[in-house]
Amino acid sequence: MRPRTIELRAMRSDVERTRYHAIRETCIFELYHHADGPYPCRYDPGHPDESAPGHHPLVLCLDGAVAGTIRIDMKPDGRAVLRLIAIAPEYRGEGLGGALLAEAEAFARRAGATRLCVNARRPALGFYSRSGFQPGHWDGCTTCPEGVPLVKPLAASLDGRATTRRAPAAAVRQAA
């Protein structure tokens, strides 16, 4: 079996942009924001947040194929807000969620982030807890009763490189 390549990067073509929006629409909006649900909202691929300064829409590619999506919004106060994270159904169960999160953290660190923020769904709390996130409100966090705002502090080590402070898993479980 040959090694697989995983890369988090900006989209390079209209085909990748179409795939990015399709994954987000089907894996997030159709699932959580459908018209007859409690929080209806239509997906808008042209939403101004997609091209706002400091916002980085990215794709996770596995062997060159778009397998996942994320948008990282860099804020002036050092926050990196992780938005609309999704892995396409045909790629789930391969560890790509963890790979996407690790790549997103590396991206945010390179951009100077001091903490990561995400609005999580309750079924994903264990996943985020294992990655060092803990419950915490932040400017712009969700007000949706189905979501849980989480924060992951990124600390600098003595040599200037960013390090991670992990939260105990119980902290995230308490938010559930």
Image: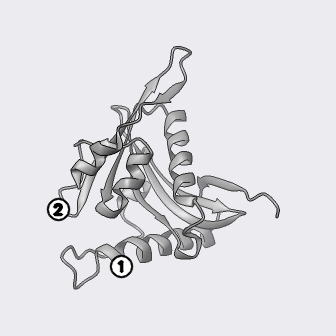
State the residue in front, 50 or 138: 138
Q: Look at the image and tell me whether residue 52 can be seen.
A: no
Residue that badge 1 annotates: 30
Residue that badge 2 annotates: 145
Q: Secondary structure at mark 1?
A: helix
The x and y percentages for residue 5 are 72, 56
The x and y percentages for residue 131 are 45, 45
Q: Residue at x 54, y 42 (%)?
A: 107
The x and y percentages for residue 155 are 43, 26
For the residues labelled 2 and 1, the Cα–Cα distance comes to 18 Å
Closest to the camera, between mark 2 and mark 1, is 2
For the residue marked with disc 2, what is the amino acid? Pro
Q: Relative to 93, is 137 on the left or the right?
A: left
Q: Does 9 appear above or below 88?
A: above
For the residue marked with disc 1, what is the amino acid? Glu
Residue lying furthest front: 170
Q: How is the image coloured?
A: one colour
Q: Residue at x 47, y 57 (%)?
A: 70
Q: Look at the image and tell me whether residue 17 can be seen.
A: yes
State the residue in front, 71 or 93: 93
Q: Residue at x 22, y 64 (%)?
A: 146
Residue lying furthest bottom: 36
Q: Relative to 8, is 35 on the left or the right?
A: left
Q: Which mark is residue 166?
A: none
Q: Does 103 appear above or below 42?
A: above
Q: Residue at x 49, y 75 (%)?
A: 22
